[in-house]
Every structure is written in C-alpha cells, then in structure tokens.
Image: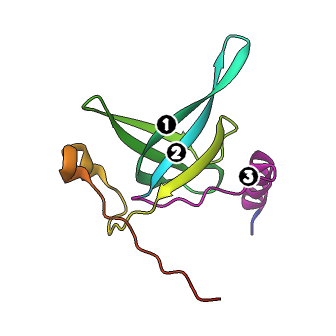
Amino acid sequence: MNLINKIEKKEIEKQLAGKPAPKIAVGDTVKVYVKIKDGEKTRTQLFEGLVIALSGSGSAASFTVRKESYGIGVERKFPLYSPAIDRVEKVRAGQIRRAKLYFLRKLTGKKSRVREKLTTKSAE
C-alpha cells in the first residue's frame, strides 16, 4: 500500500469516527440525513431516493441519489465520507444489472420502478 492510500484510509477512519461505513449499492432506495446549517443552528434534512450512480474511490467516493418531487426529478450528489452527512439508511435493496441508472431520467411513474432484491435468511 503506498503512502497516498495510507493517508486516505486514515482520513476515512477519522470521518467515520466510529460510525459504520454506509453499505449502499446502485439500485438501493436510501434515506440520506444531511446536516444543514441555518445561521447559528444546525438541523438534519432528509433526502430519500434511489441510488443511480456510485463514482470515485477512497476518500473521493460519492453517490448520486434521485427522487421525484411533485412530478419533477431531483438528483443530488453526496460525498460518501463527508462530515455533512449524518447517516445513510438503506430502505430497500434493488435488483439491478447496470452500474449506472441514468436511463431512469427519461422514465416517470411506474415505469421508473426497480425490482426489490429478495434475500433469504440463513437458518441458525
């Protein structure tokens, strides 16, 4: 491992600060809780949508979330290891065979749905 990778790994661990790393994939429906600063106060704002792209690696990794708000598609790109992100919750896992879901930009309503990935629970 070279020096740059070691420094990036240390910075990622510092950003996570004991929180688990978000385990998300393309096609997942997620809730992203973002810290917003309003003057002196900070509040948490929810952005819920479908992950349509993952890009970058290491500390520069980011993901794009798309949602429909009042019939208009809204996309937002988040850095994966950012102090502005409070937490990322996975609502449901999607079954997808593409790396990027940019084709969903042209689709609306029921046509833009992604099938849910069915997982089996192992017998313990």
Query: For the residue marked with disc 2, what is the amino acid?
Result: Lys
Disc 2 packing (10 Å; few <14; some 14–19; many ≥20): some
Q: Position of residue 1 (x, y in %)?
A: 75, 69
Q: Which of the two discs, 3 and 2, sits closer to the camera?
A: 2
Q: Position of residue 34 (x, y in %)?
A: 60, 34
Answer whether labels 1 and 2 touch (C-beta < 8 Å).
yes
Label 1, on which residue?
47
Q: Could you tell which of marks 1 and 2 lies nearer the N-terminus?
A: 2
| Cα–Cα gap, marks 1 and 3 | 23 Å
- Vertical placement of 27 versus 87: above or below? below
- Please tell me which residue is depicted at 65% across the width and 47% down the height of the picture: 81
Give the residues drawn in magenta, as a range. Answer: 3-27
Magenta-drawn stretch contains 19: yes
Label 3, on which residue?
12
94 or 81: which is nearer to us? Answer: 94
Could you tell me which quadrant the C terminus lies in?
bottom right
The local secondary structure at tag 2 comes to strand
Q: Is residue 81 left or right of residue 90?
A: right
Query: For the residue marked with disc 3, what is the amino acid?
Result: Ile
- Please tell me which residue is depicted at 65% across the width and 50% down the height of the picture: 59
- Vertical placement of 29 versus 67: above or below? below
Query: For the residue marked with disc 1, what is the amino acid?
Result: Phe
- Vertical placement of 65 versus 119: above or below? above
The local secondary structure at tag 3 comes to helix
Q: Could you tell which of marks 3 and 2 lies nearer the N-terminus?
A: 3
| Cα–Cα gap, marks 3 and 2 | 21 Å
Q: Position of residue 88 (x, y in %)?
A: 59, 48
